[in-house]
Amino acid sequence: MAQDRNLILTVCTGNVCRSPMAEKLLQHALAAEDAPLDQLSVESAGVAAGYGEPASNNSVAALNKVKIDLAHHQSQPVTQELIDRAFMIIGMTDSHLDILAHYHTGLPKRLHLFREFMGPHVDVQIPDPYGQNFEAYQQCLDSMIEGIPSLLAYIKQEYK
């Protein structure tokens, strides 16, 4: 039964910029929903991440502006254990999903991009702001916030 898979895993490359921001935004959005959606757990990981790196300063600062705390984040790589618990995995770009499909087995059937559900004429890729200025991180965050309503609608339809 898919119900024991109650994890939504957000995935990027190093798990210090995009996927931690996506994780916190999604946690925040789901916490405001009724059961069973508010029971879903959200974690983030990276396809090329190490353990224990903090989120980038600009990621923390961008989320602070929307009153969400990312200061205690610790990076982690994608593991089979995380995959086995995942109801859904959300990548930031096609390359993340390609890497997962290439290196891992037992992936959930719901393997999507964060902005995938926004409609046909939208850029679904969320480019990596790593090493760029605060503006790039702000754009990254804004593009995720834009994607939240359509992503939530999809999760509502799928998670019963």
Image (spheres, grey):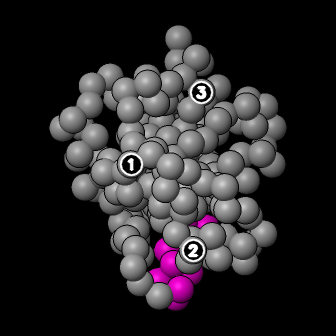
Assess whether residue 137 is covered by the magenta stretch: yes
Amino acid type assigned to the residue bearing label 1 in the image: Gly
All told, the count of numbered labels is: 3
Which residue has dot 2 on it? 57
Label 3–label 2 contact, CB within 8 A: no
Assess whether residue 86 is covered by the magenta stretch: no
- Using the numbered discs, state the Cα–Cα distance from disc 1 to disc 3 in whole angstroms: 24 Å
Q: For the point 45% across and 55% down, which residue is it?
A: 15
Helix, strand, or loop for circle 1?
loop
- The mark nearer the N terminus, 3 or 2, is 3
Which residue has dot 1 on it? 50
Q: Quadrant of residue 62?
A: bottom right
Position of residue 55 relative to residue 52, above or below, is below
Look at the image and tell me whether residue 35 can be seen: yes
Name the outermost residue toward the left: 102
Report the front residue among 1 and 17.
17
Residue 87 in percent (x, y) is at 51, 30
Q: Residue 105 vs residue 3: left or right?
A: left
Residue range corresponding to the magenta coloring: 134-145
Amino acid type assigned to the residue bearing label 2 in the image: Asn
Q: Residue 65 vs residue 9: left or right?
A: right
Q: For the point 48% across and 65% down, which residue is it?
A: 17
